[in-house]
Image (cartoon, rainbow, N blue to C red):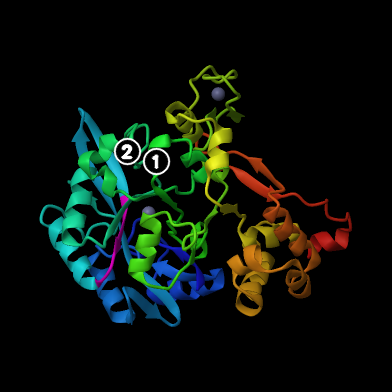
């Protein structure tokens, strides 16, 4: 069977998350989005674990069910340690095959650290120790460097990370089978590293709000079976794991270098702001260019199949000529995903004829423009979020239309 999976989401017990991040809400939004398999997130948190054990019904083979949406046990932890004389902080996504493995992982982690304060707990293991600890507890569990190119707590972060995967994981590097690209990177960036050629690339939303579920996701053509999924990822099997869904990484607020105060994204070769003279705040792209061995073209050529999408809610707002948080746009979006079809199906899977039959003409044009990557992109820099917009002919200058 074909389904979209999003493994990295958070509960209401994580910092900065929406109070509605409860299992029934997650399941409802997974349906709106067309995500058939959702990570539970946060299984290390005591209260969330109680909720998971209460709400989720075992569906067999390491998969759980709530109201027709399937779940798989996941969590995110931060390894905080010193190595090579520097403080390191690297986030990891954990996938576990059953609650017994979860209980044993928790036992091992809470020996030293408090797991109750934050649902993304900070643990005092090195990245290498985390992989070996989890692997010894459960060979079927999976440890994945989370948002590996992210600007903050990540494997390749300039401040807290490493230049090479082997430096972080040592002898355990071979057991790191996949990396999560995260919102700030995509497969064409990741494939600029020859050292990562054997590793799979996962894409997950890291959602802190239910509406963000499925913002990035993985497409599988496999039985919904924990072992099959982990094997397909571990082998980077392009038959069972044929594609990922990507946000435009340029939307990340630290994608490019620049100076926010002067509204100046860095031009090629510039290291300081020509207006105020300050050194540009470097972006993810600078880091990628500094570390990668291959050219951007070669990265694009080697990248696995992926689909870069703009959220349907943004396309709806744009087609109406309003802001995405306008009531009219939110209403239309909810009507579409509850009465017409799930978001990812509309954005990616439906034939044009079906779109034309079910959706307003201008929205169909926007969906098709995104599929062709006819998208205007303004990269984010120095904390200024980037912007993307489907390229459409201007709205007719009818004052009546502007009022809708
Ligand atoms: Zn996260
Ligand atoms: Zn400046």
* Image disc number at residue 103: none
Q: Which residues are magenta?
A: 92-98
In which image quadrant can residue 301 be found? top right
- Check disc 1: other Cα within 10 Å, few if <14, some if 14-19, many if 20+: some
Q: Is residue 306 above or below residue 74?
A: above
Residue 322 at x, y percent in the picture: 71, 58
Front in this rendered view, residue 313 or 192 = 192
SS of the residue at dot 1? helix
- Residue visible at 75% across and 49% down in the picture: 391
Which comes sooner in the sequence, label 2 or label 1? 2
For the C terminus, the quadrant is: bottom right
SS of the residue at dot 2? helix
Q: Is residue 54 above or below residue 202?
A: below
Residue 51 at x, y percent in the picture: 29, 75
In which image quadrant can residue 11 be found? bottom left
Residue 96 included in the magenta stretch of the image? yes
- Check disc 2: other Cα within 10 Å, few if <14, some if 14-19, many if 20+: some
Q: Label 2: which residue? A: 165
Pointer 2 residue Cβ closer than 8 Å to ligand 1: no
Front in this rendered view, residue 334 or 61 = 61
Residue 16 showing in the rendered view? no
In which image quadrant can residue 153 be found? top left
Q: Quadrant of ligand 1?
A: bottom left
Q: Label 1: which residue? A: 196
């Amino acid at each position: 069977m074909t389904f979209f999976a999003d493994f990295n989401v958070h509960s209401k017990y994580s910092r900065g998350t929406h109070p509605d991040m409860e299992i029934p809400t997650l399941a409802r939004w997974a349906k709106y989005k067309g995500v058939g398999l959702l990570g539970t997130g946060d299984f290390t948190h005591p209260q969330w674990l109680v909720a998971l054990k209460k709400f989720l019904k075992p569906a067999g083979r390491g998969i759980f069910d709530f109201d027709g949406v399937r779940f798989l046990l996941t969590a995110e932890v931060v390894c905080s340690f010193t190595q090579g004389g520097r403080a390191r902080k690297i986030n990891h996504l954990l996938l576990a095959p059953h609650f017994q493995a979860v209980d044993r992982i928790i036992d091992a982690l809470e020996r030293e650290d408090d797991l109750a304060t934050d649902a993304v707990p900070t643990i005092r293991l090195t990245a290498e120790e985390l992989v070996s600890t989890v692997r010894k507890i459960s060979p079927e569990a999976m440890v994945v460097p989370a948002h590996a190119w992210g600007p903050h707590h990540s494997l390749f972060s300039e401040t807290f990370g490493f230049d090479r995967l082997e430096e972080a994981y040592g002898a355990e590097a071979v057991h790191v089978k996949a990396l999560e690209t995260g919102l700030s990177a995509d497969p064409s960036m990741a494939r600029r590293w020859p050292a990562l050629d054997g590793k799979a690339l996962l894409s997950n939303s890291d959602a802190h709000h239910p509406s963000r579920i499925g913002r990035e996701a993985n497409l599988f053509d496999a039985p919904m079976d924990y072992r099959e999924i982990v094997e397909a990822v571990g082998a980077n099997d392009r038959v069972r794991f044929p594609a990922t869904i990507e946000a435009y990484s340029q939307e990340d607020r630290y994608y490019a270098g620049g100076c926010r105060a002067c509204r100046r994204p860095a031009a090629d070769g510039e290291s300081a702001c020509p207006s105020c003279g300050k050194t540009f705040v470097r972006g993810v792209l600078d880091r990628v260019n500094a570390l990668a061995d291959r050219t951007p073209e070669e990265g694009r050529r080697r990248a696995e199949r992926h689909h870069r999408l703009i959220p349907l809610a943004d396309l709806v707002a744009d087609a109406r000529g309003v802001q995405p948080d306008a009531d009219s746009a939110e209403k239309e979006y909810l009507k579409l995903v509850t009465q017409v079809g799930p978001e990812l199906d509309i954005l990616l899977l439906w034939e044009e004829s079906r779109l034309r039959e079910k959706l307003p003409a201008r929205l169909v044009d926007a969906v098709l423009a995104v599929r062709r990557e006819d998208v205007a992109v303004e990269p984010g820099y120095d904390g200024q979020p980037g912007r993307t917009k489907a390229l459409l002919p201007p709205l007719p200058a009818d004052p009546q239309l502007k009022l809708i």
